[in-house]
Amino acid sequence: MTGRSAALSRPIARRRGGAPRATGPLRGAERRAGILFSLPVIVLTGALLFLPIIQTFYYSLTSWNGITSKWVGLDNFRQMVDDPVFWRVLLNNAFLLLSIPFAILIPLMVAFLLHQHVFGWRVFRSLYFLPTAISWVVIGMVAARVFASRGILNDLLAMVGLRADLLTNEYTAMLAVILTFIWSVFGTNTIIFITGMATLDRDIYEAAKVDGAGGLAIFRFITIPLLMRFIQFTFVLTLITGFTALFSLIFVMTTGGPGYGTTTLEFFVYQKAFAQGVFGYAAAIGVALFAIVFAINLVQQRLLRSRED
Amino acid sequence: MGATDYLRRRLGRALVFAILCVVTVVMLYPFWFMLVTSLQSYSQYLNRSGFSLDSWVQLSDVLPLAQQLFNSTLVTVSAVAIILVVSTMGGFAFAKLRYPGRSIVLLAIVGGMMVPLQSIIIPEFVNIANVGLINQFQGAILVYAALGTPFATFLMTTYFRGIPSELIEASIIDGASYLSVFVKVMIPLATPALVTVAVLQFIQIWDDLLIGLLFLQTPEVRTITVGLATLQSSRIINVPVLMAGSLASAMPAVIVYVIFQRYLVAGLTMGMRK
């Protein structure tokens, strides 16, 4: 906001203030400084981020073992489409996608409760955000015990006479990963929503209460619509986390199994490349992942823009 | 009538408080589990009773704890330092200096934020191996720095845009160089944003597994997070020892979190400003 207004005021100030800036040696100095100051970021990201992207695209079109590569055109992509494992893996990503509404709705409801500012709400807020600081490795290690046959989950279920060995079944293991994922993003999403709620006009709530709206009606008809921008941001953030940041969790918690039960696209890239050494095919999967994330971002930006217009 | 209304309100707030308490238990259980389990020996863990420091002693036998904590600190702090220097310089240039190609470079770097690590990790690994930096701290540090830089640069650019340009222009007309404006005017003003970037990146790099796993493979150069993950995959270490290791690896990032919490929150919401 402030950035935009500063940018707008600049040319006006220049025209009004008599000193003719941006001519002769001063302008050249600014240009030189600009190039020099942005050089480090260009060199660093160019060599270690943008070059590898181009290489990934190139190598996805080759048969490559890390040392010698042979041009094979679209063969890797053909192989991918014909690979039943690829579709099995994609199904896991679809499960993740389906879990996103829960990863948003639960924090949204809790943020709404926090926003009632009951006794100690600031302490609650800090405690909920705490897991954000711990690594996926640690989270995965604890989660594996929570869902184990003698873990807390089964202790609790035993009280009502039930059992659940989620991690030992090819399909329920993904459920365990997803529950852990929802737990992990809970803090971040709650903080985003509580920040969003703080920006809302308190008068609207007061007016709604005067009109006799209950808590649920306020949540459904005022909070959610007014927070749409925050919900969208959180959706993308959570989805990208789910698709690109769960490697460590899966590595520690399930190593992708049982079978391919918890192998997502990003884990599949790692397996293909570093466990099986088929770098060309792995690069093709990497390209597919890149395309999916890119598409999600594009759709999101379209949505945001159309809403602002 | 007024009295029952008051009662209903109190009851509602008590209910909200109770729900928030339940959520707290769910969120803190892992910390509790780690702590309690790490204070048991394996047999005590199986019997679910008794306490001892056996597992902590055993942990220091199976994991070069001090060495790996040092490695983590070295790698994380170096990478964060590089990120800070590079992103502040870049952010200053993108926000405040006019030169050809500026907007396209900024667009590319912001776009770099959404590149999934897995999509570039293979060539990255091969490139670093080709220059002989596998198992060298420099290799991992550079990769961490490059991956953290786009988001940091985005945050710094956003922040610098909020600083009035008149401050710079006045100094330049008085004959100051851009370098001295940057060092003497911009850096002091940007301190809160610098702390935010540093804290966000510190936690992210400290907690990372994949880069460490691939680029620092031998036990002597491993970071603590990688050391812990490899313990787990060796499958011989028992649960209490693993929980002691988890706690040891998590503590530094948790401490940084507790001290700098408000900067973290600021960073999250700063990411939303367009």
Image (cartoon, coloured by chain):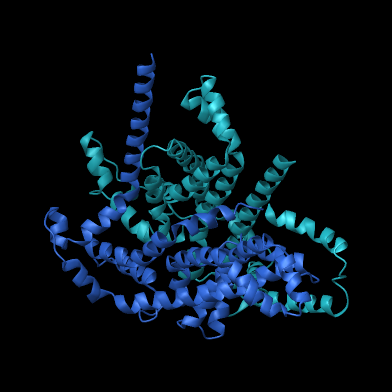
Tell me, by letter, which chain the rendering colours blue.
B
x and y percentages locating residue A198 in the rendered image: 53, 42
Q: Quadrant of the C terminus of chain A?
A: top right
Task: From the viewer's perspective, tell me whether residue A52 is left or right of residue A174.
Answer: right
The foreground one among B21 and B125 is B21
Q: Residue at x 65, y 55 (%)?
A: A294
Q: From the viewer's perspective, tell me whether residue A303 is left or right of residue B196.
A: right
The reply to whether residue A66 is visible in this rendering is: no
Is there any visible trace of residue A14 in the rendered image?
Answer: yes
Q: Looking at the rendering, which quadrant does residue A86 occupy?
A: bottom right
> Residue B169's image quarter?
bottom right
In the rendered image, what is the letter of the chain coloured cyan?
A
Q: Residue at x 88, y 78 (%)?
A: A24
Residue B235 horizontal side relative to residue A61, left or right: left
Q: Residue furthest bottom?
A: B132
Q: Position of residue B9 (x, y in %)?
A: 38, 25
User: Measuring 59% from the left and 57% from the top, which residue is drawn there?
Assistant: A289
The image shows a total of numbered marks equal to: 0
